[in-house]
Amino acid sequence: MNRTSLVLAGIAASAVLQQAAHAAPLYSDDFDTDTSTNYNVFVTAGATGPSSDATFAYDYNAQLGIPTAPNSTGGTTKGLRLRVDNLQSSVGTVVGAVSVATKNISSLPAQYVLSVDVWSNYIGSTGTGLASSGSNGSTGVTVGVATAGTTIQYIAGNDGMLVEAFGDNGGGANGAYRVYTNNTSPRPTPANSTYYAAGTGTTSASNTDPYYNFLTAKTAPSAQTTSNASTQFGSTAVGTIGFAWHTFTITKDATNYIWAIDGTTITTVPIANITAGGTQVSLGNDDTGLTGSSVAANQLLNAEIFDNLTINAVPEPSALALIGLGSLLGLRRRRK
């Protein structure tokens, strides 16, 4: 086979791979409509009722001035909004939390990738603006896999694997980037764990580590700086996810669960270290404490937005090899 044939074979193999990559997802939800019946919703309790809430088909542009998510089609601006301790303070738990979990995923292949667009919004401080969050604004975004979907997934407990990132720099001693492997492991996994792509140093889970500098400082949408000028001014801290769309992925390959933000690996956890509870996935919002706030500005601005949840199969290496070999053989037959 000459060089031209090899090039053509490569093009053919690439075309087949592209077709595989664009196959129908195993699960998808763009949250443009109310799909709440497909999820179990869990919230920590307050003294007189739920502490937190979940709103499906929430128009984040109309309410918060947030632009369309990167993986949306047609410019739609509806998603899932989660708010923690916005109704009242949580009681009888470690921290306040809300999580939603799928309930209709019957099975998943051995290898897959979950993807979801995330926007973390919070009220800034009257003194420093977005450089640090204001009242009840320091909360974490969570994404979970391999859960049974029958219990709340949060700081105090989970099944499967749960990852978490804080929109501001308020993660505290446990860091802005966290991974929870199961209920018996340290919660969260210590910063010096080999899981973190940032290394095993004391700052590997902190937004101050230079590894996270790819997350540049951001400003609030103009709608927020206009309506809430006293808190929404300035920029976020470098290394945090606040006030920008980010695509979170969790890839399960042959040996690991790999969490990435915008294509940059955050943690890699061996499958053997995860106690899987089931085949469901979760999205959530954790507080750093229990205290709630019903102030109107807090109600509006403290929110985690999710959009375009998908799960796709990842072709195994043997399947990719067969695709390439088949393309080469096909071209060889035509040449004869």
Image (cartoon, rainbow, N blue to C red):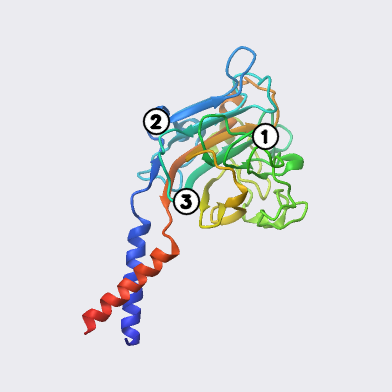
What residue is shown with label 2? 35
Q: Secondary structure at mark 1?
A: loop
User: Is 335 above or below relative to 81?
Assistant: below
* Other residues around mark 2 within 10 Å, as few (<14) / some (14–19) / many (≥20): some
The amino acid type of the residue labelled 2 equals Thr
Q: Which mark is residue 113?
A: 3
From the viewer's perspective, is 306 left or right of 332? right
Separation (CA) of disc 2 from disc 1: 28 Å
What residue is shown with label 1? 138
Q: Residue at x 39, y 43 (%)?
A: 27
* Other residues around mark 3 within 10 Å, as few (<14) / some (14–19) / many (≥20): many
Q: Residue at x 68, y 57 (%)?
A: 198
Whether residue 325 is visible, yes or no, is yes
- Decide which of tag 3 and tag 2 comes sooner along the chain: 2
The amino acid type of the residue labelled 3 equals Val
Q: Which-is-in-front pick, marks 2 and 1?
A: 2
Of 322 and 290, the residue lying toward us? 322
Q: Which-is-in-front pick, marks 1 and 3?
A: 3
- Decide which of tag 1 and tag 3 comes sooner along the chain: 3
From the viewer's perspective, is 1 left or right of 234? left
Of 325 and 21, the residue lying toward us? 325
Separation (CA) of disc 3 from disc 2: 21 Å
From the viewer's perspective, is 35 left or right of 48? left
Q: Residue at x 36, y 64 (%)?
A: 17
